[in-house]
Amino acid sequence: MTDLASQAVTLDRAQSARSVLSLRDVSLNYGAGIAVLQNLSLRIERGEFVSVVGRSGSGKTTVLNLAAGFLTPDAGQVLIDGRRVTGPGPERAVVFQDDALYPWRSVADNVALPLKLAGVPASERHARAARLLEAVGLAGEGAKRIWQLSGGQRQRVGIARALAAQPEFLLMDEPLGALDAMTRELMHGLILRLWQDSHAGAMLITHSIEEALFLSTRIVVLAPGPGRIVHEESADWGRRFLSGNDPRALKSEPGFIAARERLVDAIYEREAA
Ligand SMILES: Nc1ncnc2c1ncn2[C@@H]1O[C@H](COP(=O)(O)OP(=O)(O)OP(=O)(O)O)[C@@H](O)[C@H]1O
């Protein structure tokens, strides 16, 4: 697998100053009058990997949709470097569980689509798509159609496409939820390397506490009714994996297990009350 940083894919934006994506005191009610999120604040700097965990219905996807600009808060603000976000933008890329790829287009065309929309000339976008496919371990698969790929391969195409736009922030909503456990573990390494090489800030919504702990530099726990942050943890297992540590050994460390238990307690505390 090719190191993105060693490729010309190295991002113009990656060299720019630190950016911050922030949700500041946001509230949202989907028009039903019942608050889904209330006064929630969350900040993600480039270079951070922030996972959002919490029970079903706690508002995780709503948080990501606000950060992506798909939703507008009823109160509070979504900001990038202090500028108000009013909709989706090229500095934020989103990866969904349902990969939202075009099955009738080739793999390479799917990856290059954001570049086409941005007006990048054909020869350059084909070259960049090829480099991104190499980075996600799909070199030589560009001519295939999406329906010819496995679930794990499709998610890798989705991630390559998200990175094609050279985002400052990569927003992922359960991107690995449909994958088997082994493929999921392989994808963890891939996501960590791409995150490191792209210098992006990452937000991950996941139901897997272990996944959140292993990948993230920070994990926030949302509690429902209305959705708000009730717990935060800092972590560095992903960074230690990137510096050569064995993932299974890392996940067996007492510190990892203790952090996992704290997160479980924070997620289920209110239910027990
Ligand atoms: N489009 C919508 N219209 C009305 N209510 C919605 C809408 N989308 C979500 N909700 C409600 O908002 C709350 C939070 O939903 P959200 O999808 O953000 O939670 P989640 O934590 O991501 O859940 P899950 O883990 O099940 O995906 C839920 O009560 C849900 O029913």
Image (cartoon, rainbow, N blue to C red):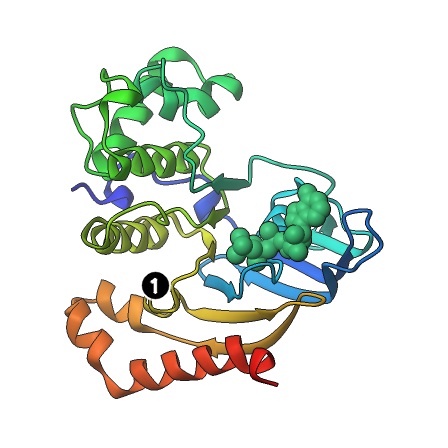
Say if residue 28 shows up in the picture: yes
Q: Residue at x 52, y 19 (%)?
A: 117
Residue 250 shown left or right of residue 46 in the figure? left
Say if residue 19 shows up in the picture: no
* Residue placed most toward the observer, 252 or 10: 252
Q: Quadrant of the N terminus?
A: top left
- The location of residue 110, given as percent across then percent down, is 38, 22
Q: Where is residue 115, by image quadrant? A: top left
Q: Residue at x 73, y 49 (%)?
A: 83
Q: Is residue 269 above or below residue 213?
A: below
Residue 62 shown left or right of residue 150 in the figure? right
Q: Is residue 135 above or below residue 18?
A: above
Q: Secondary structure at mark 1?
A: helix
Q: Residue at x 20, y 32 (%)?
A: 138
Residue placed under numbered mark 1 in the picture: 211
* Residue placed most toward the observer, 182 or 238: 182
Q: Where is residue 87, by image quadrant? A: top right
- The location of residue 141, given as percent across then percent down, is 19, 23
Q: Amino acid at mark 1?
A: Glu
Q: Is residue 89 above or below residue 264?
A: above
